[in-house]
C-alpha cells in the first residue's frame, strides 16, 4: 500500500504530436513548484510517489501549477482484491463526513484482471454497503465517488478529486510582458495569461518623487503573488517614467496626455520585449472602465506597439475581476493607497475618443519624446523575485 497522488490534465490530452512537449513541461513545473519526492508519467497519468511527504503539503503546492485539471490522493496496491477492499475501507473512514450516497467508478486498462470494470464496481459497491450502513448507492448524483483504476502493474484506489485550474503549464506558450500597475486588474490579467501557458515578466512605470518607495514595494509585493505560479523566478522591471510624463504634460494637449503616456509605455515595453525575446504585451484593460479604455482609445494606444496586445479581462465585469483578485491574494495589496504613475499625471478631462492620425500628428511635434523614452529605458531597474510558497 503506497501513498501517491494521481494527477490528471484535460486540454493537454487534446494535443496531437505536441502532447509530449506539454506533458514534459507540466512534469517539470510540478517538480520545480511542488518539489515531490518522486514523479513520473505512467498509464496516461502523472504519478507522484509521496513517500514521507504529507498530502496536505503537496496539495497546497499543486494549486500553483497550471495545466492540472484535477488530482486525487490515492493508494497504489497490487492486483489483490482483498488489498483493494482494505484501501477502500481506509479511505472512506478517512473521507466520510455527512455523505449519504456513493458510487464506485472503475477504469480497467489492464484486461487480464479477472473482473471487468462493471463487475469490480459491483463487488466493491456491495462491500461498501456491508461496512457503511449509512450509505446507499446513487449512480447518477452521488455525494462521494470511490475511484479504482486498474493498471498493468498496480491498482490506484482513491475517493474524490481535487479540482484545479486546468489550462497549460507556464512556459509552454511563450513569453509575454505584463504591464503591471498597482491596481486590481493587471495582476489578474497576468494570472489568466499564465493559465494559458505564457511565462510573464512584469513591467511597471513609476514617477519618483511623486510616487514613493511604498509604491515600488507595492509592485514588488504584487510580483511576489504572481511569482508563485512560475517554475523558476519572476523578473520584474521598473521604469522611472517621470521625465517622459512631465514632458508630455507640458507639451501636449492635456486631454490627450494620458493616451500619449500609454503609447510611450507601449514603445518602452516593445524595447524590453526585444531584449528579453517576448512575443506579446499583456494589459489589464477592460472596455469602458476608464476614459483610456474606450474602443477608440484602445485602438490608438495599441497602434504604438509592434507586438500583439493581449487583454484577457477585456469583457469582464469588475466584480468578477475583484473576486479573482481576492482568490489569488492580490486584492489587499492592490487597494493599498499608494499612487502609480498614471494617477499622478492624469488629465482633468481625459478624451474618450481619439484617432491614430491625430495623436501621431501631436507626437511628431514632441521632438524630445523619443530621446526621453530611450533614457527611461536605459535607467530601467531589474528585480528578480524568487518563488515563495
Image (cartoon, rainbow, N blue to C red):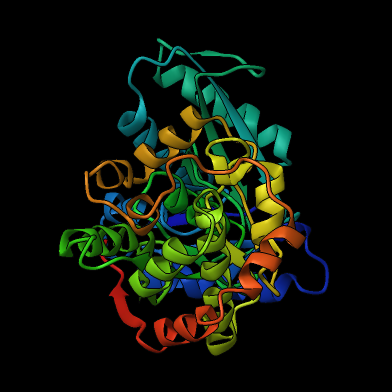
Q: Which is more toward the observer, 301 or 354?
A: 354
Q: Indicate whether 97 appears above or below 55.
A: above
Residue located at (70% from left, 67% from top) = 361
Rendering quarter of residue 11: bottom right
Q: Is residue 212 left or right of residue 389?
A: left
* The C terminus lies in quadrant: bottom left
Q: Which is more toward the observer, 366 or 237?
A: 366
Indicate the position of residue 55 as horizontal and vertical percent values. 31, 52
Residue located at (41% from left, 56% from top) = 64
Indicate the position of residue 56 as horizontal and vertical percent values. 28, 49
Q: Which is more toward the observer, 52 or 202?
A: 202
Residue located at (77% from left, 73% from top) = 18
Rendering quarter of residue 380: bottom left
Indicate the position of residue 359 as horizontal and vertical percent values. 67, 61
Q: Indicate whether 281 appears above or below 167.
A: below
Rendering quarter of residue 203: bottom left
Residue 48 in sight in this render: no
Tally of numbered discs: 0
* The N terminus lies in quadrant: bottom left
Q: Which is more toward the observer, 313 or 270?
A: 270
Residue located at (71% from left, 64% from top) = 303
Residue 346 in sight in this render: yes
Amino acid at each position: 500500500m503506497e501513498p501517491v497522488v494521481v494527477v490528471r490534465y484535460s486540454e493537454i490530452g487534446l494535443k496531437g504530436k505536441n502532447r509530449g512537449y506539454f506533458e514534459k513541461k507540466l512534469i517539470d513545473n510540478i517538480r520545480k513548484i511542488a518539489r515531490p519526492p518522486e514523479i513520473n508519467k505512467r498509464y496516461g497519468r502523472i504519478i507522484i510517489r509521496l513517500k514521507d511527504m504529507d498530502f496536505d503539503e503537496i496539495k497546497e503546492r499543486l494549486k500553483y501549477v497550471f495545466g492540472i485539471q484535477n488530482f486525487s490522493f490515492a493508494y497504489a496496491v497490487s492486483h489483490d482484491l482483498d488489498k483493494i477492499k482494505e484501501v477502500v475501507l481506509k479511505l472512506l473512514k478517512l473521507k466520510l463526513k455527512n455523505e449519504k450516497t456513493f458510487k464506485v467508478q472503475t477504469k480497467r486498462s489492464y484486461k487480464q484482471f479477472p473482473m471487468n470494470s462493471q463487475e469490480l464496481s459491483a463487488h466493491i459497491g456491495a462491500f461498501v454497503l456491508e461496512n457503511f450502513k449509512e450509505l446507499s448507492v446513487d449512480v447518477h448524483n452521488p455525494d462521494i465517488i470511490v475511484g479504482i483504476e486498474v493498471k498493468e502493474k498496480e491498482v490506484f484506489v482513491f475517493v474524490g478529486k481535487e479540482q484545479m485550474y486546468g489550462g497549460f503549464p507556464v512556459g509552454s506558450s511563450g513569453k509575454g510582458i505584463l504591464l503591471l500597475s498597482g491596481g486590481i486588474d493587471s495582476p489578474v490579467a497576468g494570472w489568466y495569461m499564465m493559465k494559458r501557458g505564457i511565462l510573464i515578466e512584469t513591467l511597471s512605470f513609476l514617477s519618483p518623487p511623486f510616487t514613493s518607495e511604498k509604491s515600488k514595494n507595492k509592485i514588488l509585493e504584487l510580483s511576489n503573488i504572481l511569482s508563485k505560479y512560475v517554475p523558476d523566478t519572476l523578473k520584474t522591471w521598473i521604469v522611472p517614467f517621470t521625465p517622459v510624463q512631465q514632458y508630455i504634460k507640458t507639451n501636449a494637449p492635456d486631454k490627450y496626455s494620458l493616451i500619449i503616456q500609454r503609447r510611450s509605455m507601449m514603445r518602452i515595453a516593445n524595447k524590453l520585449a526585444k531584449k528579453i525575446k517576448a512575443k506579446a504585451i499583456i494589459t489589464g484593460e477592460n472596455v469602458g472602465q476608464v476614459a483610456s479604455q474606450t474602443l477608440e482609445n484602445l485602438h490608438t494606444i495599441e497602434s504604438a506597439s509592434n507586438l500583439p496586445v493581449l487583454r484577457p479581462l477585456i469583457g469582464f465585469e469588475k466584480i468578477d475581476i475583484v473576486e479573482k483578485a481576492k482568490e489569488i491574494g492580490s486584492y489587499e495589496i492592490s487597494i493599498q493607497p499608494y499612487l502609480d504613475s498614471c494617477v499622478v499625471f492624469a488629465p482633468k478631462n481625459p478624451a474618450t475618443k481619439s484617432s491614430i492620425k491625430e495623436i501621431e500628428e501631436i507626437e511628431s511635434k514632441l521632438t524630445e519624446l523619443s530621446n526621453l523614452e530611450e533614457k527611461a529605458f536605459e535607467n530601467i531597474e531589474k528585480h528578480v523575485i524568487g518563488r515563495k510558497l
